[in-house]
Amino acid sequence: MTAKIYKLTYRLFMSGQKELGWSSTLRSLNVSGSDNPDQSYLSPDGTPIENKQHLRDLGVQLSSDCTFSIHIDNVVTSVSKMLGWVLRTFRSRSKVVMMTCWSSLLQSRLDYCCQLWSPCDQASITKLEGLAKQFSSHITGMEGLDYWERLKALQMYSQERRRERYLIIYIWKLAMGLVKGYKIEFSHSPRRGWSAIPKTIVQETPSSVRKAREGSLAVKGAALFNICPRGLRDMASDHQDRFKQNLDSWLSEIPDQPTIPGCQRAAISNSLLHQVPMMQKEFDKNLT
């Protein structure tokens, strides 16, 4: 791996990640994907970079191929073990008991630092979604319902929709100055109101670096924020609870259809980046 590629990768993760505690740890990661690199490299501050295939900081694993695949596998394993313990320990399968266990013991493990590692590839999304799918199937009253129907009956978001919701909230907090340290630029116009300016993606970079950039908070998070209604994006910072309530109200109108066998949806994926334009397309079609 050339020093130029390393610098691009370094800037990719360093830009805006200081408040997440990654600034010092990333200096020790040589994102080479090789066990025996031809030469050693120095970080921008002159510190020698130790070659590692992955590193862990604050409980999050980053791999040398610019993915969080190891971290996601660890999350799936951890939640699966806890899920098994819950099913063995609690005899009741009532909605109240099961949803209390899910919220207090399982969901927090899936949410931790997800604004950093939230995946874009369908394989990882399906792994994480499978945990909620499996758990919800054990709840009394959910017999005979598919996963989409169970989400509605339990008034739950899919895991992908939940992560994207959090990304939107985080970007809004940045726009309102409620979060410091993460650098995202915003623009304001009389017609569109507040909009986030996504970071640029250099197409000449390796695919692993480009994919990591595309899925980052500064790119995907900004795009999610920009598809929200103007009334949400422009809401004042002293109305945090109302912002979340209005966001939930808007999200309730958007189909939440995670990928599962036997169920077909109109949108390419369940991401809001695909579901919202599809809704608008269907709305415009009905007007003609």
Image: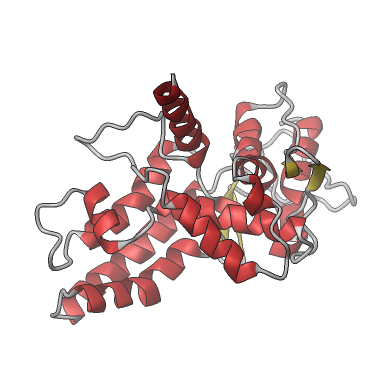
- Number of numbered discs visible in the structure rendering: 0
Extreme-top residue of the structure:
288
Extreme-right residue of the structure:
45
Point out residue 86 in the picture as x, y percentages from the top left corner: 24, 75
* Image quadrant occupied by the C terminus: top left
Rendered position, 145 above or below 262: below
Rendered position, 173 above or below 98: above
Q: Is residue 71 visible?
A: no
Tell me if 274 is positioned left or right of 47 in this view. Answer: left
> Which residue is depicted at the point 28% across and 55% down?
152
Point out residue 31 in the picture as x, y percentages from the top left corner: 67, 41
> Which residue is depicted at the point 66% across and 27% down?
206
Structure colour scheme: secondary structure
Q: Is residue 281 visible?
A: yes
Extreme-front residue of the structure:
287
Tell me if 216 is positioned left or right of 139 in this view. Answer: right
* Image quadrant occupied by the N terminus: top right
**Residue nearest the viewer, comparing 2 with 176:** 176
To which quarter of the image does residue 12 belong?
Answer: top right
> Which residue is depicted at the point 37% across and 65% down?
78
Rendered position, 59 above or below 37: below
Point out residue 139 in the picture as x, y percentages from the top left corner: 17, 67
Rendered position, 175 above or below 240: above
Tell me if 42 is positioned left or right of 123 in this view. Answer: right
**Residue nearest the viewer, comparing 70 with 253:** 253
> Which residue is depicted at the point 73% across and 62% down?
236
**Residue nearest the viewer, comparing 125 with 174:** 174
Point out residue 188 in the picture as x, y percentages from the top left corner: 81, 44
